[in-house]
Image (cartoon, helix red, strand yellow):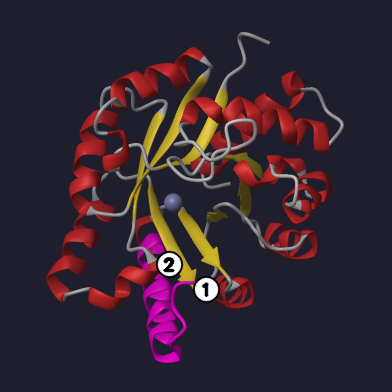
Amino acid sequence: MDNLIYLDSHAHAFSDDFDEDRMEMIQRAKDKGVILLNIMCTSTEEAYRAMEYAETDPAHIRVSCGIFPTDVNDLTPEKKQEFIRVMKDPRCTCVGEIGLDYYWEKDEAMRAKQRELFIEQIHLANELQKPICVHSRDAMQDTFDIMKEHRCHGLMHSFSGSAEMGREFVKLGYYLSLGGPVTFKNARHAREVVSSMDVNYLLSETDSPYMAPEPVRGTRNEPSNIPYIVARMAECRNMEVTELAPVIVNNWQRFLEMR
Ligand SMILES: [Zn+2]
């Protein structure tokens, strides 16, 4: 049990929230076996710092950068070019998080702009032969329709759709990453997804610093909390953690090889 290796496919490890103790936080994760880390960057400044760090351990640490859906509102052409430069950088593994957020955006014209930017970034990812990490909030059907029409290789981060919807994404070859909500008492959906989906498309994430799982819910989340999440996932599937953790690690390797 002590020797298990874990994946955190979505951690904002270079956000300001960790400025005080970033290296200690990463060490705490390593001590728990959470050595596979995908660092999500929502700004280019963050991405350059993360990419520099990732060079110290490229086998385990990955960096993702993309234009977050609601950032379309004040996106200048210069800013967009800066993002594209980072996405093209060989040290940037995935394009993301990109997608649609209708929770924070109620205006239909701006939602249309989000869809346009999402499609544009999917095309760029395809050109670069990189996978995408997708953020979808209150916009599952539109997200699905776009990813069905504009096929690519990618994962749904913090998947919040129904089990049925989850299976539809998996049918198209997309992976589903789940986090803290699987441990929440009221999150029946997330557990149904975990228990009924093809286990070979399942990934684990924290979404640090957000979404801390039980029993540390409400605190600043960090990658060292992954074991709580994977333990709960294993329980949902009537599996041992010792069985499930290696499957998730294997899924991540396959995801990176774009298979
Ligand atoms: Zn995120």
For the magenta stretch, what is the residue range? 102-126
- Residue under circle 2? 122
**Closest to the observer: 227 or 170?**
227
Residue at the right extreme, as displayed = 238
Q: Secondary structure at mark 2?
A: helix
Q: Are marks 1 and 2 in contact (CB under 8 Å)?
A: yes
With 84 as the anchor, is 223 left or right in this view? Answer: right
Q: Residue extending furthest left?
A: 78
Q: What residue is rendered at 82% in x and 38% in y?
A: 236
Q: Position of residue 95 (x, y in %)?
A: 38, 55
Type of the residue with mark 1: His
| Residue at point 31%, 39% (across, down) | 17
Q: Earlier in the sequence, mark 1 or mark 2?
A: 2
Q: Main secondary structure of the magenta part?
A: helix
CA distance for labels 1 and 2: 7 Å
Q: Which mark is residue 249?
A: none
Q: How many marks?
A: 2
Foreground pick, 62 / 232? 232
